Image: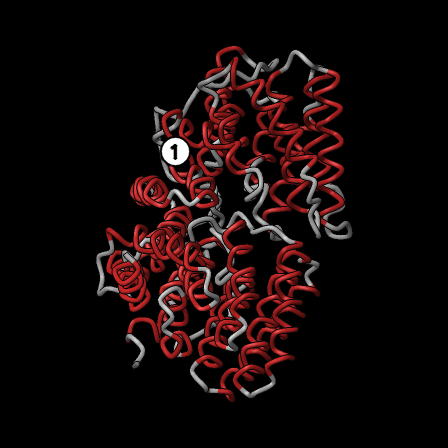
Amino acid sequence: MKAVPILTMTFAAILSTVVLGMAQDPHEHGAADPSRIGTVHFATSCDGAAQPDFDRAVVLLHSFWFGAAIDGFEEVASMDPRCAMAYWGIAMAEWGNPFGGIRTTEALERGAAAVRKAVQLDPSTERERAYVAAVGELYQDFAATRQRDRIVAYERAMEKVHLLHPADPEAAVFYALALDQSAVSQVPPDKTYAQRLEAGALLEELFAAQPDHPGIAHYIIHSYDVPALAPRALDAARRYARIAPDAPHALHMPSHTFTLVGEWQASIDTNTASARVAREEDSVAEELHAMDYQTYAYLQTCRDASARRIVDGLPGAAARLDVRSAGGGAPGPAGLFALAAIPARYSLERGMWEEAAELLASASDFPPAEAVTRFARALGAARSGDTARAEAEIAELERLRLVLEERDDDYWAVQVLIQRKLASAWLLHVEGSHEDAVTLLRSAANLEDETEKSAITPGPLVPARELRGEMLVELGRTDEALVEFETALEKGAHRFRSLHGAARAAEQSGELEKARHFYGEAVRLCGGGDGPERAEVRQARAFLEQDG
């Protein structure tokens, strides 16, 4: 099949249109004036007249509306030039999304300057000095200290603030967020989820007393943003968007939970709303981030025409993206990631291997975005028999992995290693080294099991165990394949390709009851499909009709 023209140019072409910070200063955040954003009170010793503005800025901070929060804290500082906590708030907002990966030197310098200003103003209470000292840990000697070490130091400092001020609910909320940030930054992660569970329990207790607090709902979702814990976040996910419907990130965040539990229509609905509000507020990275999650959900439900419309709209969104903007919860790199991931998902989820091989990649300051396209090209080329192209793309993945290692970005270096292993395994399979391919896929799958997905993505571009199951089916080892697909479904609930793969493996293994179940689930998912019916759905229907 020939590649669809827009896909052969998507990432490389649209990246060339991305505004790389020249169009606006990163401190120019716009004049967003949302009203339905929740309720928070953060007591300070600053001028009482500035307290409502301070509370509002903290509300914005809790929904990761960082640009508007900086504006709010700067307004507080103009009202009370002696308000050290205004600069605490600016430093917190400059840090950005706690789950956003390695920070830029520019952002770190701005945040460190805000900390220095807060210290210079000498906060008038011990509590406020403790808050300022805590945020200072995030920026302490940042040129020589690994980010992970600074995050752990911040977590410990916020624990002290919380323990010394147990009656301060904001200390508890920010401590819970610090626990989550520390948990996410650990590579490999702690699979007991001790810190996440501690944070979640603390937040759930607070939620009962402050049901309109946006940060509590928000951080519960992050605390449980792993497959094993996701059901615990469903109540917060269903409430957060109602608490802060004017905040684009509040509209998007519920989809983290909905994705993990496979509630695809709920994910589509909340991301449609998030993308619309983000577009109205010119929060382009947030818009693209929502579009990526939305595309993922569309593709699980065979709404391929809807997904294609998002692909077609990418150049327009790319032209408005400023990767340096403080903006919303999704940082500039999240926008770059979405620009690469959306067309890659569109090809790979539909099994259009030649189409995937024709995607064009382009370098950016965020190597994981380029790696997404390189991986899609490598896998597509291998599975369509273009071994030379597959080899070249695998070499590019290794180059990107080394770049990430040099940047001390441990998480993404591991993710790109997994991608390289997956693509290499399929190349070995195509070349006839089947046992080596299956072994390498096991290595990739085990490594992926040891990690967790980044908040930047709804999931791996293609789950490793799903890919291993597909290879085992091709080799006639269907009993083993069924185990791989069922394991994949434990982490990726109601994924279409995993369901269909499990059904096919079960059918060929003679486990007809399981085949009926999985084929039925696949057909049910695609009941509202809006594109040409996929071959997999036709096969599922044929089996169910014959079996029935």
Measured from the top left, where is residue 249 in percent x and y? Answer: 42, 38
In depth, the one of 56 and 404 nearer the eye is 404
Rendering coords of residue 461 (x, y %): 48, 61
Q: Residue 169: x percent and y percent?
A: 60, 17
287 or 91: nearer the eye? 287
Image-based side of 264 in relation to 87, left or right: left
User: How many numbered marks, from 0 up?
Assistant: 1
Asked whether 159 or 307 is in front, the reply is 307
What residue is at 51 percent from the left and 82 percent from the top?
A: 390
Vertical position of residue 405 compared to residue 94: above or below: below
In the image: residue 136, left or right of residue 312: right
Q: Position of residue 167 (x, y in %)?
A: 65, 11
Tell me the crowding category of disc 1: few under 14, some 14 to 19, or many 20 or more residues within 10 angstroms, Cα based. Answer: many
Q: Nearer the viewer, residue 256 or 473?
A: 473
Q: How is the image coloured?
A: secondary structure
In the image, residue 395 above or below residue 177: below
Q: Quadrant of the C terminus?
A: bottom left
Q: Secondary structure at mark 1?
A: loop
Figure quadrant of residue 244? top left
Q: Amino acid at mark 1?
A: Ala
Q: Check the image and report above or below for 399 versus 458.
A: below
Any part of residue 187 in sight: yes
The N terminus sits in image quarter: bottom left
Q: Quadrant of residue 534?
A: bottom left
In this orientation, does residue 324 appear? no
Q: Which residue is mark 1?
A: 247
Q: Residue at x 39, y 24 (%)?
A: 243
